[in-house]
Image (cartoon, rainbow, N blue to C red):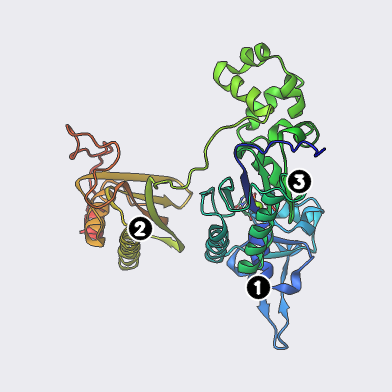
């Protein structure tokens, strides 16, 4: 008699997360660092220097002084206790010999696009969760529901392996994939065998693979909820699954406590959302040195125009118009100020953006020096379409109330 085959879950959802992403991209450029403790988080001054003989000089953490933090670290650095968000000076105490590299976001974005495109060729239903992670719905991928021998999950395992191979071929980078019946479990599963992991978890595996984990690992249990659970002696997901619903409700309210219980039992029916419309599109730049509205007027004016032009080209490329134009200014000392203005009609061109952003600027006191300038376009719509949420009456002439008198200086700079 044939053994009964365990039923396949209704959905097969994967979560894919790149391994030590920024650091791994840097290793592609500096392969001699492979296997060594490396930390990304330096300034441009920490760019490696090429020596006459072709070898490179790298900066060591021990030589670092400043207030920077670790953006990410290689696994070799993590074994020394150096993780994301740790101060670089503190990290230097743990791993003085670790190599320090500056971050290069353009390259990370490039590799992000590459890995996502590689996945999309195999499985088109993808939810973008940021630079280095995505959810993938494998339910309808050809072959994913086919058993291999006695293994009902053999098909989906093979598809996940193919995705990992394809990412590696396209980028030279490894990633970790979790495959489970839903997003909540997949996000947990992708971490279980990092780096280069492929972890399939079914409901039957819950007690062995998921329940021993600390509650904080669940995406949606933050530091506050985690601490409160711990005071109730709920440390692991198993503790949470066993907790009396009334006790949870008493401390967390009906809604969140219900969700906590479901999460501990591995239940989650959120769909993989393939398309999300941006709320706004922005461009900003931090200056090499702080600039003053009056003394550095030509330079500021040029940067301001360039930002508006970049933004207009972003809008045109992505096919959006926008009706709210905003600015962001950061002054020396880090004080940040924003202003915005909503126009009657949506715009897409650099001159119109520049004009509206200029009006916003006149509402700011510019006597202090600036370290950052940003321009943003919001209330986006597609050409010929009414923007979501825009209602008939009253729309079309709202201006955010934050008036302040233009100073003569502002008028000189921006008219
Ligand atoms: N990142 C950041 N600030 C943090 C954490 C991470 O800027 N506090 C950046 C750097 C990471 C990237 O985001 O390379 C992805 O974050 P992950 O949490 O996925 O971390 P890694 O990919 O570096 O490591 P892992 O292998 O654990 O996924
Ligand atoms: Mg990652």
Q: CA distance from mark 3 to mark 1?
A: 40 Å
Q: Which mark is residue 29?
A: 1
Q: Quadrant of residue 338?
A: top left
Q: Is residue 359 left or right of residue 117?
A: left
Residue 6 place in picture, x, y as percent: 73, 36
Q: Please tell me whether mark 3 or mark 2 is closer to you in this view.
A: 3
| Residue 236 visible in the shown view | yes
- Quarter of the image with the N terminus is top right
Residue annotated with mark 2? 318
Residue beneath the point at 56% across and 66% down: 107
Q: Residue furthest front?
A: 1
Please, is residue 299 above or below residue 66 in the view?
A: below
Q: Element type at marker 2?
A: helix
Q: Quadrant of residue 404?
A: top left
- Quarter of the image with the C terminus is bottom left
Please, is residue 232 above or below residue 75 in the view?
A: above
Residue annotated with mark 3? 151
Q: CA distance from mark 3 to mark 2?
A: 44 Å
Q: Is residue 125 left or right of residue 43?
A: left
Q: Residues within 10 Å of mark 2 (few under 14, many from 20)?
A: few
Residue beneath the point at 57% across and 58% down: 122
Q: Quadrant of residue 77?
A: bottom right
Viewer-nearest residue: 164 or 143 = 143
Residue beneath the point at 46% across and 63% down: 289
């Amino acid at each position: 008699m044939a053994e009964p085959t365990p039923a396949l879950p209704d959905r097969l959802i994967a979560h894919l997360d790149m391994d030590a992403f920024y650091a791994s991209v840097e290793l592609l450029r500096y392969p001699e660092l492979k296997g060594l403790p490396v930390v990304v988080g330096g300034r441009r001054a920490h760019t490696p220097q090429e020596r006459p003989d072709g070898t490179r000089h790298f900066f060591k953490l021990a030589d670092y002084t400043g207030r920077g933090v670790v953006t990410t670290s290689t696994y070799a650095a993590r074994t020394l206790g150096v993780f994301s968000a740790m101060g670089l000076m503190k990290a230097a105490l743990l791993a003085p010999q670790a190599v320090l590299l500056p971050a290069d976001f353009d390259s990370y974005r490039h590799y992000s696009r590459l890995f996502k495109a590689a996945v999309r060729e195999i499985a088109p239903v993808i939810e973008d969760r940021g630079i280095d992670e995505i959810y993938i719905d494998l339910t309808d991928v050809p072959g994913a529901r086919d058993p291999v021998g006695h293994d009902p999950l053999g098909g989906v395992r093979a598809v996940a392996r193919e995705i990992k191979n394809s990412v590696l071929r396209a980028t030279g980078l490894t990633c970790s994939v979790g495959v489970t019946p839903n997003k909540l479990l997949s996000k947990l599963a992708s971490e279980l065998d990092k780096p280069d992991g492929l972890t399939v978890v079914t409901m039957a595996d819950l007690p062995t693979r998921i329940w021993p984990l600390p509650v904080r690992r669940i995406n949606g249990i933050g530091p506050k909820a985690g601490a409160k659970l711990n005071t109730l002696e709920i440390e692991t997901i198993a503790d949470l699954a066993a907790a009396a619903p009334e006790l949870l409700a008493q401390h967390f309210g009906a809604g969140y406590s219900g969700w906590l219980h479901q999460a501990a039992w591995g239940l989650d029916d959120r769909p993989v959302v393939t398309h999300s419309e941006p709320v706004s599109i922005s461009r900003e730049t931090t200056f090499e040195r702080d600039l003053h509205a009056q003394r550095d007027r030509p330079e500021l004016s040029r940067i301001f125009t360039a930002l508006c032009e970049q933004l207009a080209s972003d809008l045109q490329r992505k096919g959006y118009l926008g009706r709210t134009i905003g600015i962001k200014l950061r002054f020396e000392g880090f004080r940040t100020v924003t202003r915005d203005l909503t126009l009657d009609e949506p715009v897409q061109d650099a001159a119109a953006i520049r004009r509206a952003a200029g009006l916003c600027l006149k509402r700011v006191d510019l006597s202090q020096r600036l370290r950052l300038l940003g321009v943003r376009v919001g209330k986006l719509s597609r050409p010929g379409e009414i923007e979501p949420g825009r209602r008939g009456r009253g729309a079309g002439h709202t201006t955010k109330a934050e008036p302040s008198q233009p100073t003569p200086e502002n008028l000189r700079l921006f008219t």
